[in-house]
Image (cartoon, rainbow, N blue to C red):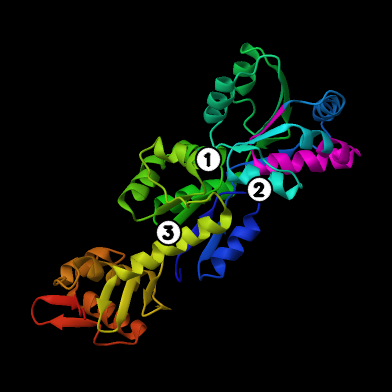
Amino acid sequence: MAGCTVLVTADRRKSELAAALQRRGAEVRHAPALSMIPHADDEQLLAGTRDLVEHPPDVVVVTTGIGFRSWVEAADVHGLADRLLEVLADARIVARGPKARGAIQAAGLTADWVAESETSAEIADVLLGEGVSGLRIAVQHHGAGADGLDVVFAEAGAEVASLVVYRWGPPPDPEALRASVEAAAVGEIDAVVFTSAPGAEAWLSAAEEHGVGRLVVSRFQDGSMVAAAVGPITAKPLEHRGITPLQPERGRLGALVRTLVAHYEQAETVALATVAGVLQIRSRVAVLDGEVLPLSPSSLEVLRLLAARRGDVVTRDDVLDVLPGDSRDPHAAEVAVARLREATGRRDLVKTVVKRGYRLELA
Protein backbone atom coordinates (compact mmCIF):
# COMPACT_ATOMS: atom_id res chain seq x y z
CA MET A 1 0.00 0.00 0.00
CA ALA A 2 2.96 2.30 -0.54
CA GLY A 3 1.76 5.78 -1.40
CA CYS A 4 -1.87 5.13 -0.37
CA THR A 5 -3.57 7.66 1.87
CA VAL A 6 -6.17 5.88 4.01
CA LEU A 7 -8.78 7.67 6.11
CA VAL A 8 -9.89 5.93 9.33
CA THR A 9 -13.34 7.12 10.42
CA ALA A 10 -13.49 5.20 13.71
CA ASP A 11 -12.61 6.52 17.16
CA ARG A 12 -12.35 3.19 18.95
CA ARG A 13 -9.27 1.05 18.13
CA LYS A 14 -8.09 3.67 15.66
CA SER A 15 -4.46 3.31 16.76
CA GLU A 16 -4.54 -0.45 16.24
CA LEU A 17 -6.11 -0.06 12.80
CA ALA A 18 -3.70 2.72 11.81
CA ALA A 19 -0.67 0.70 12.90
CA ALA A 20 -1.76 -2.29 10.82
CA LEU A 21 -2.16 -0.10 7.73
CA GLN A 22 1.09 1.78 8.29
CA ARG A 23 3.03 -1.49 8.55
CA ARG A 24 1.88 -2.13 4.99
CA GLY A 25 3.12 1.22 3.74
CA ALA A 26 -0.03 3.35 3.91
CA GLU A 27 -0.24 6.92 5.15
CA VAL A 28 -3.12 7.14 7.63
CA ARG A 29 -5.38 10.04 8.54
CA HIS A 30 -7.84 10.05 11.44
CA ALA A 31 -11.23 11.74 11.40
CA PRO A 32 -13.68 9.92 13.71
CA ALA A 33 -17.26 10.60 12.62
CA LEU A 34 -18.66 9.78 16.08
CA SER A 35 -17.47 9.35 19.63
CA MET A 36 -18.48 6.50 21.90
CA ILE A 37 -19.77 7.42 25.34
CA PRO A 38 -19.70 4.48 27.79
CA HIS A 39 -22.33 4.07 30.48
CA ALA A 40 -20.06 2.60 33.15
CA ASP A 41 -21.53 4.86 35.84
CA ASP A 42 -25.04 4.98 34.42
CA GLU A 43 -27.55 4.27 37.19
CA GLN A 44 -30.02 2.71 34.78
CA LEU A 45 -27.45 0.21 33.49
CA LEU A 46 -26.40 -0.61 37.06
CA ALA A 47 -30.01 -1.12 38.13
CA GLY A 48 -30.72 -3.30 35.10
CA THR A 49 -27.65 -5.44 35.79
CA ARG A 50 -28.61 -5.95 39.44
CA ASP A 51 -32.11 -6.89 38.37
CA LEU A 52 -30.75 -9.55 35.99
CA VAL A 53 -28.55 -10.97 38.72
CA GLU A 54 -31.55 -11.22 41.05
CA HIS A 55 -33.95 -12.41 38.34
CA PRO A 56 -31.90 -14.41 35.83
CA PRO A 57 -32.96 -14.33 32.17
CA ASP A 58 -33.75 -17.33 30.02
CA VAL A 59 -32.18 -15.76 26.92
CA VAL A 60 -29.52 -13.06 26.53
CA VAL A 61 -29.12 -11.28 23.18
CA VAL A 62 -25.68 -9.73 22.64
CA THR A 63 -25.75 -7.25 19.76
CA THR A 64 -22.17 -5.90 19.77
CA GLY A 65 -18.77 -7.05 20.95
CA ILE A 66 -17.76 -3.69 22.38
CA GLY A 67 -21.12 -3.39 24.11
CA PHE A 68 -20.80 -6.76 25.80
CA ARG A 69 -17.23 -6.11 26.92
CA SER A 70 -18.23 -2.68 28.24
CA TRP A 71 -21.16 -4.22 30.10
CA VAL A 72 -18.92 -6.73 31.89
CA GLU A 73 -16.39 -3.98 32.66
CA ALA A 74 -19.13 -1.74 34.06
CA ALA A 75 -20.38 -4.63 36.21
CA ASP A 76 -16.83 -5.20 37.45
CA VAL A 77 -16.53 -1.55 38.53
CA HIS A 78 -19.48 -2.17 40.86
CA GLY A 79 -18.42 -5.64 42.01
CA LEU A 80 -21.07 -7.45 39.98
CA ALA A 81 -19.01 -9.06 37.21
CA ASP A 82 -18.63 -12.53 38.74
CA ARG A 83 -22.31 -12.82 39.58
CA LEU A 84 -23.32 -11.47 36.17
CA LEU A 85 -21.14 -14.01 34.34
CA GLU A 86 -22.59 -16.85 36.45
CA VAL A 87 -26.10 -15.80 35.50
CA LEU A 88 -25.21 -15.46 31.82
CA ALA A 89 -23.57 -18.90 31.82
CA ASP A 90 -26.92 -20.44 32.80
CA ALA A 91 -28.85 -18.57 30.08
CA ARG A 92 -29.10 -19.22 26.37
CA ILE A 93 -26.76 -16.67 24.76
CA VAL A 94 -27.55 -15.36 21.27
CA ALA A 95 -24.89 -13.34 19.44
CA ARG A 96 -25.54 -10.89 16.59
CA GLY A 97 -22.52 -11.79 14.49
CA PRO A 98 -18.91 -12.95 14.96
CA LYS A 99 -17.68 -9.86 16.82
CA ALA A 100 -20.33 -10.35 19.49
CA ARG A 101 -19.43 -14.05 19.68
CA GLY A 102 -15.75 -13.17 20.10
CA ALA A 103 -16.51 -10.92 23.07
CA ILE A 104 -18.66 -13.62 24.64
CA GLN A 105 -15.84 -16.16 24.29
CA ALA A 106 -13.32 -13.68 25.70
CA ALA A 107 -15.47 -13.52 28.85
CA GLY A 108 -15.23 -17.30 29.22
CA LEU A 109 -18.75 -17.94 27.94
CA THR A 110 -20.15 -19.69 24.87
CA ALA A 111 -22.68 -18.34 22.39
CA ASP A 112 -25.43 -20.91 21.84
CA TRP A 113 -26.40 -19.42 18.50
CA VAL A 114 -24.89 -16.76 16.20
CA ALA A 115 -26.71 -14.65 13.61
CA GLU A 116 -24.22 -14.88 10.76
CA SER A 117 -26.02 -12.11 8.85
CA GLU A 118 -25.22 -9.81 11.82
CA THR A 119 -28.78 -8.51 11.79
CA SER A 120 -31.33 -8.14 14.57
CA ALA A 121 -33.96 -9.22 12.04
CA GLU A 122 -32.42 -12.70 11.85
CA ILE A 123 -32.41 -12.95 15.65
CA ALA A 124 -36.06 -11.93 15.78
CA ASP A 125 -37.05 -14.42 13.07
CA VAL A 126 -35.34 -17.35 14.80
CA LEU A 127 -36.49 -16.65 18.36
CA LEU A 128 -40.03 -15.74 17.38
CA GLY A 129 -40.17 -18.89 15.26
CA GLU A 130 -39.21 -20.94 18.31
CA GLY A 131 -41.63 -19.04 20.55
CA VAL A 132 -40.75 -16.59 23.31
CA SER A 133 -43.98 -16.39 25.28
CA GLY A 134 -43.26 -16.57 29.01
CA LEU A 135 -39.50 -16.20 28.59
CA ARG A 136 -37.39 -13.52 30.23
CA ILE A 137 -35.12 -12.05 27.55
CA ALA A 138 -32.27 -9.60 28.19
CA VAL A 139 -31.15 -7.50 25.20
CA GLN A 140 -27.81 -5.67 25.21
CA HIS A 141 -28.29 -2.84 22.73
CA HIS A 142 -25.72 -1.12 20.54
CA GLY A 143 -24.90 2.57 20.62
CA ALA A 144 -27.77 3.57 18.35
CA GLY A 145 -30.24 2.38 20.98
CA ALA A 146 -33.27 0.12 20.57
CA ASP A 147 -33.54 -1.72 17.27
CA GLY A 148 -37.03 -3.15 17.56
CA LEU A 149 -36.18 -6.40 19.35
CA ASP A 150 -37.69 -5.22 22.64
CA VAL A 151 -41.03 -4.47 21.02
CA VAL A 152 -41.40 -7.64 18.95
CA PHE A 153 -40.40 -9.90 21.86
CA ALA A 154 -42.75 -8.12 24.29
CA GLU A 155 -45.61 -8.31 21.82
CA ALA A 156 -44.97 -12.05 21.52
CA GLY A 157 -45.38 -12.50 25.26
CA ALA A 158 -41.81 -12.26 26.56
CA GLU A 159 -40.62 -10.26 29.55
CA VAL A 160 -37.89 -8.02 28.17
CA ALA A 161 -34.98 -6.39 30.01
CA SER A 162 -33.12 -3.73 27.97
CA LEU A 163 -29.53 -2.73 28.65
CA VAL A 164 -27.92 0.16 26.79
CA VAL A 165 -24.21 0.01 27.57
CA TYR A 166 -22.93 2.88 25.46
CA ARG A 167 -24.22 5.49 23.06
CA TRP A 168 -22.86 7.37 20.09
CA GLY A 169 -21.88 10.97 20.67
CA PRO A 170 -20.75 13.86 18.44
CA PRO A 171 -17.43 13.70 16.58
CA PRO A 172 -14.49 14.42 18.89
CA ASP A 173 -13.06 16.88 16.34
CA PRO A 174 -15.70 18.39 14.02
CA GLU A 175 -13.05 20.36 12.12
CA ALA A 176 -11.08 17.20 11.35
CA LEU A 177 -14.29 15.55 10.16
CA ARG A 178 -15.04 18.49 7.84
CA ALA A 179 -11.50 18.48 6.49
CA SER A 180 -11.67 14.73 5.85
CA VAL A 181 -14.80 14.85 3.68
CA GLU A 182 -13.42 17.80 1.73
CA ALA A 183 -10.08 16.01 1.22
CA ALA A 184 -11.95 12.94 -0.01
CA ALA A 185 -13.95 15.03 -2.45
CA VAL A 186 -10.90 16.67 -4.08
CA GLY A 187 -8.90 13.47 -4.48
CA GLU A 188 -6.51 13.53 -1.53
CA ILE A 189 -7.76 10.21 -0.12
CA ASP A 190 -7.28 6.77 -1.70
CA ALA A 191 -9.40 4.69 0.70
CA VAL A 192 -11.86 5.27 3.54
CA VAL A 193 -12.28 2.63 6.24
CA PHE A 194 -15.59 2.19 8.11
CA THR A 195 -16.05 0.01 11.20
CA SER A 196 -19.68 0.73 12.22
CA ALA A 197 -22.93 1.57 10.47
CA PRO A 198 -23.59 4.69 12.61
CA GLY A 199 -20.05 5.88 11.89
CA ALA A 200 -20.46 5.32 8.15
CA GLU A 201 -23.79 7.14 8.14
CA ALA A 202 -22.35 10.04 10.15
CA TRP A 203 -19.32 10.44 7.83
CA LEU A 204 -21.43 10.33 4.66
CA SER A 205 -23.94 12.75 6.20
CA ALA A 206 -21.07 15.11 7.04
CA ALA A 207 -20.02 15.03 3.39
CA GLU A 208 -23.56 15.94 2.37
CA GLU A 209 -23.84 18.69 4.98
CA HIS A 210 -20.61 20.28 3.74
CA GLY A 211 -21.76 20.22 0.12
CA VAL A 212 -19.43 17.49 -1.17
CA GLY A 213 -21.67 14.45 -0.87
CA ARG A 214 -22.09 13.93 -4.60
CA LEU A 215 -18.38 14.31 -5.27
CA VAL A 216 -17.53 11.78 -2.57
CA VAL A 217 -20.08 9.25 -3.84
CA SER A 218 -18.85 9.77 -7.40
CA ARG A 219 -15.26 9.03 -6.41
CA PHE A 220 -16.34 5.85 -4.65
CA GLN A 221 -18.42 4.77 -7.63
CA ASP A 222 -15.77 5.41 -10.30
CA GLY A 223 -13.12 3.56 -8.29
CA SER A 224 -10.80 6.52 -7.77
CA MET A 225 -11.43 6.12 -4.02
CA VAL A 226 -12.08 2.84 -2.22
CA ALA A 227 -14.62 2.28 0.55
CA ALA A 228 -13.87 -0.59 2.95
CA ALA A 229 -16.48 -1.78 5.50
CA VAL A 230 -15.87 -4.29 8.28
CA GLY A 231 -19.14 -6.15 7.59
CA PRO A 232 -22.57 -6.13 5.94
CA ILE A 233 -24.26 -3.98 8.59
CA THR A 234 -21.54 -1.34 8.35
CA ALA A 235 -21.86 -1.46 4.56
CA LYS A 236 -25.57 -0.59 4.47
CA PRO A 237 -25.28 3.25 4.63
CA LEU A 238 -22.80 3.04 1.74
CA GLU A 239 -24.95 0.68 -0.31
CA HIS A 240 -27.98 2.92 0.19
CA ARG A 241 -26.03 5.61 -1.70
CA GLY A 242 -25.00 3.31 -4.53
CA ILE A 243 -21.51 2.57 -3.17
CA THR A 244 -20.20 -1.01 -3.18
CA PRO A 245 -17.54 -1.28 -0.46
CA LEU A 246 -14.87 -3.91 0.01
CA GLN A 247 -15.82 -6.34 2.78
CA PRO A 248 -13.84 -9.11 4.47
CA GLU A 249 -15.33 -12.57 4.81
CA ARG A 250 -15.07 -12.27 8.59
CA GLY A 251 -16.00 -9.13 10.49
CA ARG A 252 -12.63 -8.43 12.09
CA LEU A 253 -10.29 -5.46 11.84
CA GLY A 254 -7.41 -7.71 10.84
CA ALA A 255 -9.49 -9.25 8.07
CA LEU A 256 -10.55 -5.78 6.94
CA VAL A 257 -6.91 -4.68 6.63
CA ARG A 258 -6.02 -7.84 4.71
CA THR A 259 -8.92 -7.29 2.33
CA LEU A 260 -7.79 -3.72 1.63
CA VAL A 261 -4.18 -4.86 1.12
CA ALA A 262 -5.33 -7.61 -1.25
CA HIS A 263 -7.28 -5.04 -3.24
CA TYR A 264 -4.18 -2.96 -3.84
CA GLU A 265 -2.10 -6.04 -4.61
CA GLN A 266 -4.66 -6.92 -7.26
CA ALA A 267 -4.59 -3.32 -8.50
CA GLU A 268 -0.82 -3.66 -8.93
CA THR A 269 -1.30 -6.61 -11.27
CA VAL A 270 -3.35 -4.45 -13.63
CA ALA A 271 -1.24 -1.29 -13.26
CA LEU A 272 0.78 0.10 -16.15
CA ALA A 273 3.89 -1.87 -17.03
CA THR A 274 6.51 0.64 -18.19
CA VAL A 275 10.14 0.37 -19.24
CA ALA A 276 11.02 1.53 -15.72
CA GLY A 277 8.75 -0.93 -13.90
CA VAL A 278 5.13 -1.08 -12.74
CA LEU A 279 3.56 2.38 -12.42
CA GLN A 280 0.65 3.12 -10.09
CA ILE A 281 -0.90 6.55 -9.61
CA ARG A 282 -2.36 7.26 -6.17
CA SER A 283 -4.31 10.28 -5.01
CA ARG A 284 -1.22 12.33 -4.09
CA VAL A 285 1.78 10.23 -5.13
CA ALA A 286 2.99 7.88 -7.84
CA VAL A 287 4.68 4.53 -7.19
CA LEU A 288 7.20 3.25 -9.75
CA ASP A 289 8.69 -0.20 -9.37
CA GLY A 290 7.64 -0.24 -5.70
CA GLU A 291 9.17 3.15 -4.85
CA VAL A 292 7.26 6.38 -4.13
CA LEU A 293 8.47 9.02 -6.57
CA PRO A 294 9.53 12.47 -5.23
CA LEU A 295 7.15 14.39 -7.50
CA SER A 296 5.86 17.93 -7.20
CA PRO A 297 2.07 18.35 -7.59
CA SER A 298 2.60 19.61 -11.16
CA SER A 299 4.81 16.67 -12.11
CA LEU A 300 2.30 14.25 -10.61
CA GLU A 301 -0.49 15.73 -12.74
CA VAL A 302 1.62 15.46 -15.90
CA LEU A 303 2.43 11.83 -15.09
CA ARG A 304 -1.23 11.15 -14.31
CA LEU A 305 -2.14 12.55 -17.73
CA LEU A 306 0.46 10.40 -19.50
CA ALA A 307 -0.65 7.28 -17.61
CA ALA A 308 -4.29 7.89 -18.48
CA ARG A 309 -3.39 7.86 -22.18
CA ARG A 310 -1.67 4.48 -21.69
CA GLY A 311 1.11 5.03 -24.23
CA ASP A 312 -0.82 7.28 -26.63
CA VAL A 313 0.53 10.71 -27.49
CA VAL A 314 -0.12 13.67 -25.19
CA THR A 315 0.22 17.07 -26.90
CA ARG A 316 1.97 20.09 -25.39
CA ASP A 317 -1.42 21.77 -25.13
CA ASP A 318 -2.67 18.80 -23.09
CA VAL A 319 0.27 19.22 -20.73
CA LEU A 320 -0.37 22.95 -20.40
CA ASP A 321 -4.00 22.21 -19.51
CA VAL A 322 -3.01 20.30 -16.35
CA LEU A 323 -0.36 22.78 -15.22
CA PRO A 324 -1.25 25.60 -12.82
CA GLY A 325 -1.77 29.05 -14.33
CA ASP A 326 -2.95 29.97 -17.81
CA SER A 327 0.30 29.96 -19.78
CA ARG A 328 0.11 28.64 -23.35
CA ASP A 329 3.87 28.81 -23.94
CA PRO A 330 5.04 25.45 -25.37
CA HIS A 331 8.31 25.94 -23.51
CA ALA A 332 6.42 25.60 -20.21
CA ALA A 333 5.27 22.14 -21.27
CA GLU A 334 8.84 21.19 -22.20
CA VAL A 335 10.13 22.34 -18.80
CA ALA A 336 7.38 20.39 -16.99
CA VAL A 337 8.25 17.17 -18.83
CA ALA A 338 11.97 17.70 -18.19
CA ARG A 339 11.30 18.08 -14.47
CA LEU A 340 9.19 14.92 -14.51
CA ARG A 341 11.99 12.97 -16.14
CA GLU A 342 14.48 14.28 -13.60
CA ALA A 343 12.23 13.38 -10.66
CA THR A 344 11.63 9.83 -11.88
CA GLY A 345 15.33 9.27 -12.55
CA ARG A 346 14.46 7.58 -15.82
CA ARG A 347 14.74 9.74 -18.92
CA ASP A 348 13.47 6.86 -21.05
CA LEU A 349 10.13 6.73 -19.20
CA VAL A 350 8.65 9.70 -21.08
CA LYS A 351 9.45 9.72 -24.79
CA THR A 352 9.30 12.83 -26.98
CA VAL A 353 7.32 12.31 -30.18
CA VAL A 354 8.70 14.82 -32.70
CA LYS A 355 6.25 17.57 -33.66
CA ARG A 356 3.45 15.81 -31.76
CA GLY A 357 4.16 15.74 -28.01
CA TYR A 358 5.01 13.05 -25.48
CA ARG A 359 4.04 9.54 -24.52
CA LEU A 360 4.71 7.10 -21.70
CA GLU A 361 7.06 4.34 -22.78
CA LEU A 362 5.33 1.08 -21.90
CA ALA A 363 7.06 -2.29 -21.58
Q: Which residue is mark 1?
A: 116
Question: In the picture shown, does residue 13 fall above or below 211?
Answer: below
Give the quadrant of the C terminus: bottom left
Residue 278 position in % (x across, y down) = 31, 77
Q: Which residue is mark 3?
A: 190
Dot 3: element: loop
User: In percent of the image, x 16 and y 71: which residue is there?
Assistant: 314
Crowd tier of the residue under label 1, counting other residues whose Cα lies within 10 Å: few below 14, some 14–19, many 20 or above: few
Q: Amino acid at mark 2?
A: Gly
Residue 85 appears in the picture as rendered: yes
Question: In the picture shown, does residue 58 fall above or below 188?
Answer: above
Magenta region, residue range: 59-85
Residue 276 position in % (x across, y down) = 29, 84
Dot 1: element: loop
Residue 12 position in % (x across, y down) = 66, 49
User: In percent of the image, x 33 and y 46: which residue is there?
Assistant: 218
Q: Amino acid at mark 1?
A: Glu
